[in-house]
Image: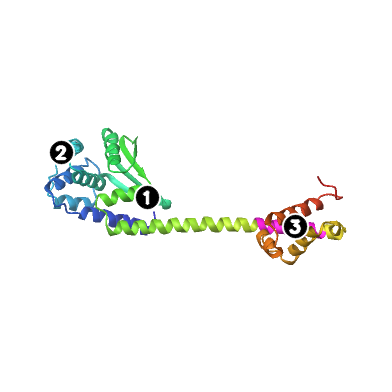
Amino acid sequence: MTAADRAIVSALRAELAAVDPIRACDREAERLGLAAGSRRRDPVVERLEVRLDRRVDAARDRGGARDFDWDGSADHCRLAWLRGRFLAHGSLSLANGRTHLELVVEPDEGAVLVARLASVGLPASWRIRRGRGVATAKGGEAVALFLRRIGGGPSLLELEARQVARTLRGELNRVLNAESANLGRSVAAAGRQLAAIDTLDAEGRLAREPAWIRTVAAARRETPEATLTDLAGRLAIHRSAVQRALERIERLALHADDRLA
């Protein structure tokens, strides 16, 4: 990630940690979601624990995921729990323009966590990595919706704006590349057509072609940069007629006589 992207992710985590639940049940759910075992904490999470007056108890840490009654809890409690889970276990990557959210938990929690994420609209997959359960979610829109639901604010808006700008730049680059490729093909085709016209003219065979073929050849000589559509508009004939005329000219130039199928 770039330094700017890392700064936005840090600001987003700080915003999520600054959410101050009004309901006591939400505060308790977030405490349980913060249970992280031996995972190294960052200052944002530590300050949140102090504010929630969470007692550090290793046994409770290990059993935090099991203590929370997901099925019996309201949606706002579930989101508070997921906010705590993300802050304690999660990371967000924006490398190469791809949004990638990851939560590292105990192996037996992976499948449960993925099911809970899916229930709030965040499709995810999980695997075992170095003895830990890793839940992974990809896709800017789905991840942004999840982060908004758990309390993301202004930093999330800035993140989304950057993603939109990045997408637009990518689309513009694709369009420009396509236009450049088309232009290159058009220039190469015009070069072949002019060479064929010169060959037929020098051999006197162009004069034996029908008037509409000669007219197209003359227009191509006068405006070598014109597209087939431009030539058709100038000559007031169909584009397909211009294309057929130029293709015939190229084919004739490849044969020593005028006999073509």
Question: Which badge, 1 or 2, comes first in the chain's sequence?
Answer: 2
Q: Which amino acid type is marked by label 1?
A: Gly
**Residue 119 or residue 36, whichever sits in front:** 119
Disc sitting over residue 2 in the figure: none
Q: Is residue 189 magenta?
A: yes
- SS at badge 2: helix
What is the CA distance from the residue labelled 1 to the residue labelled 2? Answer: 34 Å
Q: Which residues are magenta?
A: 185-198
| Residue at 31% across, 50% down | 145
Q: Which residue is mark 3?
A: 193
Disc sitting over residue 140 in the figure: 1
Question: Which badge, 1 or 3, comes first in the chain's sequence?
Answer: 1
Residue 69: x and y in percent read: 17, 37
Answer yes or no: is residue 56 visible.
yes
Q: Which residue is mark 2?
A: 60
**Quick one: quadrant of the C terminus?**
top right
- Structural crowding at the residue carrying mark 1, measured as other residues with C-alpha within 10 Å and reported as few (<14), some (14–19) or many (≥20): some
Q: Is residue 128 above or below residue 48?
A: above
Please indicate whether residue 109 sits to the left or right of residue 231 in the image. Answer: left
- Structural crowding at the residue carrying mark 3, measured as other residues with C-alpha within 10 Å and reported as few (<14), some (14–19) or many (≥20): many
Answer yes or no: is residue 129 visible.
no
Q: Is residue 216 above or below residue 146?
A: below
**Residue 127 or residue 41, whichever sits in front:** 127
Q: Quadrant of residue 243?
A: bottom right
| Residue at 24% across, 56% down | 15
Q: Quadrant of residue 113?
A: top left
Residue 94: x and y in percent read: 38, 52
Please indicate whether residue 215 sits to the left or right of residue 152 in the image. Answer: right
